[in-house]
Image: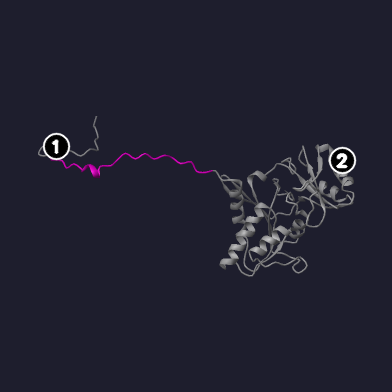
């Protein structure tokens, strides 16, 4: 058998003591490298990734719907930055809440209203739940009425969310599905809403503010939050039945409205569209 050697052959005329030897200062030293764990992305990091991707849809000259909530706030910030640097121009926004209006003004984003611009090019907003058909639950931030008005008037509606918002069925997170109601006889509607979804193990609660008093929306209404033990099977029927109740202003089921949903997760950003 032939033995292969990758070491250089020394000729008989060369003695070992004539081989050059590197000075100690030039000899390689053993280096210990410790693997550093990559810090896990926080929920805010994921929201910002989704927001940055959503802003790619924005073009100069657009009329934009500016959403409300922690994820939408990243979108508004990014739009403000791009306007400041001149990368975007001639943008006008329609805010979906007083909070968003204040934020946009602080970033010098020009604002308008649905009265003056009844048709929008694009709206970008967050979501509290996203089902496989891209139907949404929105309004845990309390702005569901204005959000739905603005987003329904938009040619395109892009949703930004992190992967924790994905559900198999609306109401599946067992967190609040809001219904905005007039203050007059709100208990009457709370009972009717709970009875409407009793088979789904629904519990209805009046939303309270930080002061322990009823939360009041920008439109001076109350919010009744519905908590489901079982996901809603038919969102369209549920929305229709809620809307039939006198005193109900709007509900947080946003059905067949989203054009695309941008989901940020630990493995990256995914865009889902119809």
**Residue at image point 74% right, 68% down:** 117
**Disc 2 element:** helix
Q: Which residue is mark 1?
A: 16
Q: Earlier in the sequence, mark 1 or mark 2?
A: 1
**249 to 61, vertically: above or below:** above
- From the image, which quarter does the N terminus lie in? top left
**Disc 1 element:** helix
Q: Position of residue 137 (x, y in %)?
A: 74, 48
Q: Which residues are magenta?
A: 16-39
C-alpha distance separating marks 1 and 2:
97 Å
Q: Is residue 23 magenta?
A: yes
Q: Which residue is mark 2?
A: 195
**Residue at image point 76% right, 48% down:** 211
Q: Quadrant of residue 4?
A: top left
Q: Is residue 273 visible?
A: no
Give neighbour class at mark 1: few <14, some 14-19, many 20+ (Cα, 10 Å): few
**Residue at image point 87% right, 40% down:** 195
Residue lying furthest top: 1
Q: Is residue 111 visible?
A: yes
Q: Main secondary structure of the magenta part?
A: loop
């Amino acid at each position: 058998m032939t033995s292969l050697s990758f070491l250089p052959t020394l000729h008989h005329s060369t003695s070992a003591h004539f081989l050059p030897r590197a000075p100690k200062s030039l000899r390689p030293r053993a280096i210990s490298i410790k693997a550093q764990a990559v810090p896990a992305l926080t929920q805010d990091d994921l929201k910002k990734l989704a927001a940055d991707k959503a802003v790619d849809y924005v073009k100069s000259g657009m009329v934009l719907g500016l959403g409300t909530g922690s994820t939408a706030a990243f979108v508004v910030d990014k739009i403000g930055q791009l306007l400041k640097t001149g990368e975007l121009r001639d943008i006008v926004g329609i805010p979906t809440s007083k909070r968003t209006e204040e934020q946009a003004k602080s970033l010098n984003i020009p604002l308008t209203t649905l009265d003056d611009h009844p048709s929008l090019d694009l709206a970008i907003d967050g979501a509290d739940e996203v089902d496989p058909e891209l139907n949404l639950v929105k309004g845990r931030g309390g702005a569901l009425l204005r959000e739905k008005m603005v987003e329904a008037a938009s040619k395109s509606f892009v949703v930004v969310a992190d992967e924790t918002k994905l559900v198999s069925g609306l109401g599946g997170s067992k967190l609040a599905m809001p219904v905005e109601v007039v203050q007059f006889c709100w208990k009457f509607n709370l009972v009717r809403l709970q009875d409407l979804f009793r088979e789904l193990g629904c519990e209805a609660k009046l939303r309270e503010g930080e002061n322990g008093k009823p939360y009041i929306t920008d439109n001076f209404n109350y919010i009744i939050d519905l908590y489901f033990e079982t996901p809603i099977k038919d969102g369209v029927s549920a929305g229709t039945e809620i809307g039939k109740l006198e005193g109900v202003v709007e509900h947080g089921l946003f059905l067949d409205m989203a054009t695309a949903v941008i989901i940020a997760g630990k493995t990256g950003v995914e865009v889902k569209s119809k």
